[in-house]
Image: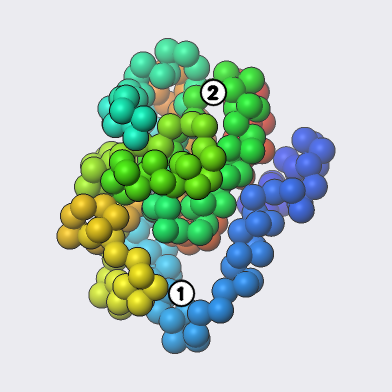
Amino acid sequence: MKILLLLALFLANVSYAETLESQLAVKRNASKAPPDIKAIMQKATADLKKTGLKKAIVMGKKAPDFTLESFKDGQFRLKDALKKGPVVVTFYRGGWCPYCNLQLKAYESRYQDFVKAGATIVAISPEKPENAKATADANKVSFDLLYDQDNRVARRFGLVFKVGKELKDVYMSFGIDLEKSQGNDQWELPLAATYVIGKDGTVLYSFVDADYTKRAEPQVLIDLINRL
């Protein structure tokens, strides 16, 4: 995967230092979490890799149509957006997640490139609309952040997992309370996932990872869309 990324960056004349992955790597390496906390988080990721990816929609499958609220007081329907061109759909955990914020900022920095390629881009999260607005404002995001109440759409994409007790306790110790940010007591999150969906609803590209510190590189998405 990394070799393919480096090749794509070379062809696009983009240096590794300019990539989203380089920013994520810096964040990963800067973690000051105690060893016991890191062990809990690493175990949760390893468990997800074993069991959490089996239901996820992948490349070649049809994406389920959906309609979701935007914090901008509007609605987004995938079927309508696809009439205009391909759609990039990315699922993020919430504004409390620093890796999600890095991804949103990276996609915003290439927003005009997505537009020029003829694509619509949206980001979906279970966080309540007021929290999504705060996330958009903090990251100066131009594209729509959509409210997926109770992870209903993420569930249809096969991305939802339940946060275990140990990991829940870790999150609470960090001040992360999903009951407050999502407005429910389910303690569920979507996997880190990004899709490029073609005009006929077919998934042309899928990035799904149990490791929340890894995200789809915007340059890879833009190159693919430009080839359509």
Q: Estimate the x, y position of residue 114 in percent, counting from the top left.
A: 60, 27
Seen at 43% across and 70% down, the residue is 46
Name the residue tied to disc 2.
119
Dot label at residue 42: 1
Q: Is residue 212 above or below residue 128?
A: below
Along the horizontal axis of the image, is 33 left or right of 146? right
Give the image quarter of residue 79.
top left
Seen at 65% across and 57% down, the residue is 23
Q: CA distance from mark 2 to mark 1?
A: 35 Å
Mark 1 Cα shell of 10 Å, populated few (<14), some (14-19), many (≥20): some
Which secondary structure, mark 2? loop
Q: Is residue 59 above or below residue 29?
A: above
Which residue type carries mark 1? Gln
Q: Quadrant of the C terminus?
A: top right
Mark 2 Cα shell of 10 Å, populated few (<14), some (14-19), many (≥20): many
Which residue type carries mark 2? Ala
Seen at 52% across and 57% down, the residue is 99
Seen at 42% across and 26% down, the residue is 202
Q: Is residue 59 above or below residue 192?
A: above
Q: Estimate the x, y position of residue 1 in percent, counting from the top left.
A: 63, 52
Evaluate whether residue 203 shows in this view. no
